[in-house]
Amino acid sequence: MDLNKIILSDEARKELVNDRRWLHAHPEEGWCVFETTWFIVRRLRSLGLEVLAGIDVIEPDAVMGRNEALVLAAQQRAIEHGVPKEFLESLSGYTGAMAILRTGRPGPVTALRFDIDALPIEETDDPQHEANAGHFRSQNPGFSHACGHDGHAAIGLALCRWLSENREQLKGTVKILFQPAEEGVRGAAAMAAKGIVDDVDWFAGGHIGCSAKLGDVGVSHFGYLATTKFDLEFFGQSAAAGSPEKGRSALMCAAAACLSLGSLPGHSQGITRVQIGKFISGTGRNIIADHAYMQLEVRGETTEINDYMAKNVEQTVKGLALAYGVDYKLTRMGEAVTYKGDEEAVALLKSAAREVPGVHSVVDMNAKIGSEDCTMLIRRVQEHGGKAAFCYYGCNHHGHHRPDFSIQDETSLPIGWGTFARFIAEINSQD
Ligand SMILES: [Zn+2]
């Protein structure tokens, strides 16, 4: 297949942009992406691809940061919005999907991953904002696609159409993953644990924006901090302030935890981070607090350094609970490892990107301080002997996770699509 002949038809480009805008108008968070999953699955079925969804792509034992009450509310909302009950039942409460093209001809297995979740951020009402000017703003109050995963999902769908239309020119197998719950690095571990990428020879993931400007493609050799997200609860005994010996203060234990965790020693071999972002406790001035709730995270420059930090959190919390005579529950809510690309896969992504119309420059781009759970899938692929790489396709934005995040979908998405379509063609075309 001639890489120069891989073009997005006008019709396909229109569908790509329309899909992104529909998804943008219907943002869902984390593990609650039921309408989104239905939108994706319905399309994949119409394209004649093999489709797995929900429980068939998610390993429940490896799920992190899933809130059952939010999931139930999202299912209800999906039903009200016309998602068939039988479909929701078939998911067994889990979201996400995977399309599989089996050409029937021997050849490598290639997989690409697209995350599909939104954020709990109210979209700006500035009339100049892309989604307001274009009349596709979020219809789900309090939520928006402020990180561009709507664009990611739309590219995945456009690739599925291309795969379906070009199957006779391809060999081997191609898998397109639509992953829930990237925000909070919660979803990829459960997809990896399901084993759906264990047979994968070549793997690629990507993100719109970040440091890449419109027309740039940044390809990563290494990067990302490994991270573990925790929820921490302390359970004490309430009592009147006048009788402190009768109570056990969860609040005081949590306050001590803030100071102790915040001053954990670092590591000589690389960067570490500790962040306590949320602390709720207490009911009134003269009542010893019987409950405290905290959200915290650690990061490390290597997976080993992050593990060292996470272990320190566990030991510190255990020790403090003993000292204050309270019970505790420490729950892992999300996890990602560092990224190390395979040079062969990196080179393939680079050569793919260079051929895409509209690309001005292809540069090395290694994210040093963020975290991304695609790394969990990448590690799984590499552990099984496959090769993987990660890239960024640019857009002009004011910053991710903001109410005015914009991506210039008509120009930016075809570049992402073109890069990944060519990556697949380099590996799976018959000639
Ligand atoms: Zn993102």
Image (cartoon, rainbow, N blue to C red):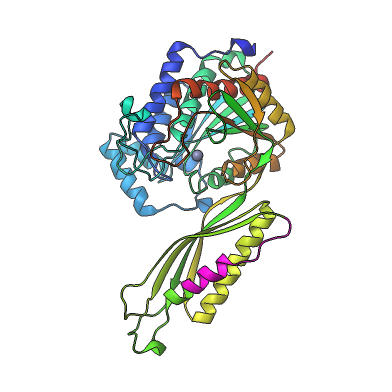
Res 153 seen here: yes
The image quadrant that residue 425 belongs to is top right
Viewport quadrant of the N terminus: top right
Q: Please state the total of marks drawn on the protein image.
A: 0
Q: Nearer the viewer, residue 217 or 6?
A: 217
Q: From the top left corner, tell me how far across and down residue 95 is, in percent.
A: 43, 41
Q: Residue furthest left?
A: 80
Establish if 296 lies above or below 167: below
Q: Nearer the viewer, residue 76 or 123?
A: 123
Q: Residue at x 63, y 23 (%)?
A: 361
Report the side of 180 relative to 286 (left or right): right
The segment highlighted magenta reads: 255-269
Residue 384 magenta-highlighted: no
Q: Nearer the viewer, residue 426 or 225?
A: 225
Q: Residue at x 72, y 35 (%)?
A: 342
Q: From the top left corner, tell me how far across and down residue 271 is, in percent.
A: 66, 54
Res 106 seen here: no
Establish if 6 lies above or below 32: above
Q: Nearer the viewer, residue 111 or 336?
A: 336
Establish if 231 lies above or below 404: below
Q: From the top left corner, tell me how far across and down residue 164 is, in percent.
A: 51, 18
